[in-house]
Amino acid sequence: MDNLPISYKQSGMALMVSLIFLVLLTLLAVSAMRGTILQERMAGNTRDRMLAFQAAEAALRVAETTLGNSGLPSGTGIYMVIGSSPAAAFTYTQQWDPAYAGTHYDWANNAATLANGSVGTNVVFQPQYVIERLTNTPPAACLGGGSSSWPIPPGKGFFRITSRGVGATTNASVILQEIYARC
């Protein structure tokens, strides 16, 4: 037996070591792929939320422009406090808020919607907004420091703009609000 070449005396240890290294490399590759997939999902979700935020911002700007025009705005998405002129038929001021309405706000039927393609084609739904008149009292800057501005002209006062934007999927939705003072 001692006359056999050295290659015949090996017991297969090199094969075992190489298989263990292959298993370790496979586990390392699978772990790296899992991390990459998770980071890809996080980046996609961030992009989706940013699209929704930008859409909501665009709706805010359109609502501001609507309030900046002469005359009191009217139409879908415009709500006035009871007793103001013109008055809409509702009993609470925060129509968009489910805590006040008791159910989810019906954005599809009760909000002004921006025209198709106004914020691009990457969003599922075009952004929407609701304008609520909070008070007939104009900001102090509108009064000019005296009482000569009374009675208050129609359409002056504080308005709350609530806008909603949806991203590339319905999973990302952003609601923004601002108070607009109209002199």
Image (tube, rainbow, N blue to C red):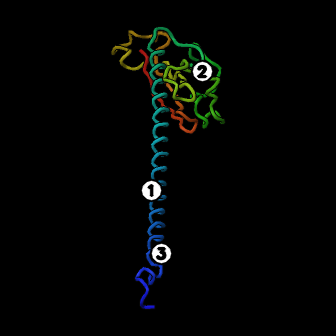
Instruction: Estimate the x, y position of residue 160 in percent, counting from the top left.
Output: 49, 25
Position of residue 35 in the picture relative to residue 169 (left or right): left
- Of mark 1 and mark 3, the one earlier in the sequence is 3
Give the residue pinned by disc 3: 16
Q: CA distance from mark 2 to mark 1?
A: 60 Å
Per the image, the residue denoted by label 1 is 32
Q: Secondary structure at mark 1?
A: helix
- Percent across and percent down for residue 144 are 34, 14
In the image, is residue 112 above or below residue 70?
Answer: below
Pick whichever of labels 3 and 2 is earlier in the sequence: 3
Q: Disc 2, disc 1: CB below 8 Å?
A: no
The residue sitting at the front extreme is: 3
Mark 3 and mark 2: Cα distance apart in space: 83 Å
Residue 79 showing in the rendered view: no
* Extreme residue in the bottom direction: 1
Residue type of the residue flagged with mark 3: Met
What is the count of numbered marks?
3
Give the vertical position of 69 relative to 42 (above or below): above
The residue indicated by pointer 2 is 82
Residue count near mark 3 (Cα–Cα under 10 Å), binned few <14, some 14–19, many ≥20 = few
